[in-house]
Amino acid sequence: MSEYPVVVVGAGPVGLAAAAQLLERGLEPLVLERGPRAGAAVAAWHHVRLFSAWSELVDPAGGRLLEPTGWVRPDGAEYPTGREWAERYLQPLAEALGSRVRFGAEVVGVARRGRDRVVDSGRDDEPFSVHVRTAAGEQRLLASAVIDASGTWGSPNPLGGEGLPAIGEHAAADRIVYRVPNLGDAQVRVRYSGKHIAVAGSGHSALTALVALSGLAKENPATRISWVLRRGGIGTAFGGGDADQLPARGALGTRAKEAVEAGLVSVVTGFRTETVERDDTGRLSLGSANGQRLSDVDEVVALTGFRPELGWLSEIRLELDATLQAPVRLAPLVDPNVHSCGTVYPHGAKELAHPETGFYLAGMKSYGRAPTFLAMTGYEQVRSIAAALAGDHEAAGRVELVLAETGVCGGAGLFDDPGTTAASDGCCGPAEPEVLTLAAPSRAGN
Ligand SMILES: Cc1cc2nc3c(=O)[nH]c(=O)nc-3n(C[C@H](O)[C@H](O)[C@H](O)COP(=O)(O)OP(=O)(O)OC[C@H]3O[C@@H](n4cnc5c(N)ncnc54)[C@H](O)[C@@H]3O)c2cc1C
């Protein structure tokens, strides 16, 4: 199989890191990206400032590949926007990878050559057949292994509280967005200024939108913001505050809390949206499963999370958790229904393996529907996967990262349990022993 490349789906932070890690291992990567440039998903939220600093956003192998090119490493203590992450790191990294990254190449299917999902015979001896759609037509590429790092940005969850669109949600599509609005854009500001906006969701994106929109409400007091939560109380939605080991992530929750306390945001709890109706004036009225109603809504910002797109993996034998749609051995580490911390221990090829030998989900997509994914988790995943593909099982099994605790015991899955609180000194218990820095400056083995 060594005559075929390892195909990586997606030139996002984790896909490009996978390519850099594979190269260091002497394996040939081929990255297929459906967008026109690297970091297409990240660039779509270019206006959002990350809560991770640069020191947590540059993959070690990516940095080592870039250094000889004259690339200037950004100040590790600064926090970039999505645009800066894409322009100052992801796009240069794709350039350094050269023809190993193809743009405008959408992966629409993966199978074993000549075999559908059902056929056992000779399965592991065949390369993968990657079905690709480009402007020039359809292609089939053969691969020795496939790392699917295509993220979840393309499939946001609906507003409907049951995970399916609410009645009337499609019909109201002109008034609903599923991404954080860019209030730096004059036209977008006009859309929201002086309006009644319902923000649904309790994750970091929802907090980001609340903070941005409350700035607008200060400027134009006619702006009303209703924060619609499925959970019975605010509970841990503001995050860990000072107990969060990522200070900017903790500060985001603190700023959202201040906006609520200042009366800029009204909180509506226990609201699982069932219906979206339009009144005679064209404004929306949201109805919840328990009979609550939120009326006179001009705009809805639905930030209820993302889910993995699995349709094009129908011919691959995946082993996914029934709840989260994440690899079965990873899911217990990240399940917000049972996980007591909101963060996850480092993990790698072993936890990400499937019955289909040589196929991995990595990055944001590997978390399925679980929240709180961090790029540094993905970098560690692909370091381990690259080691496993190169046959270095000792390195693949090694833990090389300790992640920052959120400072919150209990995650999103506990949305009806008001008893969960922010921890004062973390709640994950001791981390695994071996710790290496993410910002290692020199090439491995030097
Ligand atoms: C608003 C916001 C703020 C965030 N802030 C942080 C933060 O501060 N720190 C942090 O660590 N993480 C943050 N995240 C999470 C962040 O998205 C991930 O860390 C990172 O982008 C995940 O990288 P990825 O490569 O797994 O996926 P993505 O960045 O989503 O990249 C996937 C790539 O695959 C491509 N693709 C998709 N489908 C296909 C296909 N079928 N064929 C070919 N290409 C395809 C996409 O175009 C995209 O370029 C944030 C996310 C959001 C939405």
Image: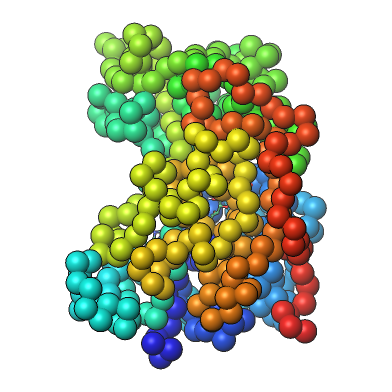
Q: Is residue 89 above or below residue 370?
A: below
Q: Is residue 240 left or right of residue 397?
A: right
Q: Is residue 373 left or right of residue 307?
A: right
- Tell me which residue sits at (68%, 13%) in the image: 262
Q: Report the residue at 28% width, 55% height from top.
A: 311
**Image location (x, y in percent) of residue 431:** 72, 50
Q: Nearer the viewer, residue 215 or 380?
A: 380
State the quadrant of the N terminus: bottom left
Decide if residue 365 is on the left or right side of residue 23: left
Residue 157's x, y, as percent? 38, 38
Kindly indicate the quadrant of the structure image that contains residue 89: bottom right
- Please tell me whether residue 279 is drawn above or below residue 80 in the rendered image: above
Q: Residue at x 48, y 48 (%)?
A: 331
- In the image, farthest residue toward the bottom: 3
Quick one: 154 or 27, which is closer to the camera? 27
Looking at this view, is 435 or 150 the one in front?
435
Q: How is the image coloured?
A: rainbow
Image: 267 above or below 216: above
Q: Give the residue displayed 66% in from the left and 24% down from the top.
A: 421
Could you tell me residue 275's position as x and y percent? 29, 19
Q: Nearer the viewer, residue 50 or 35?
A: 50
Residue 31: x percent and y percent?
46, 73
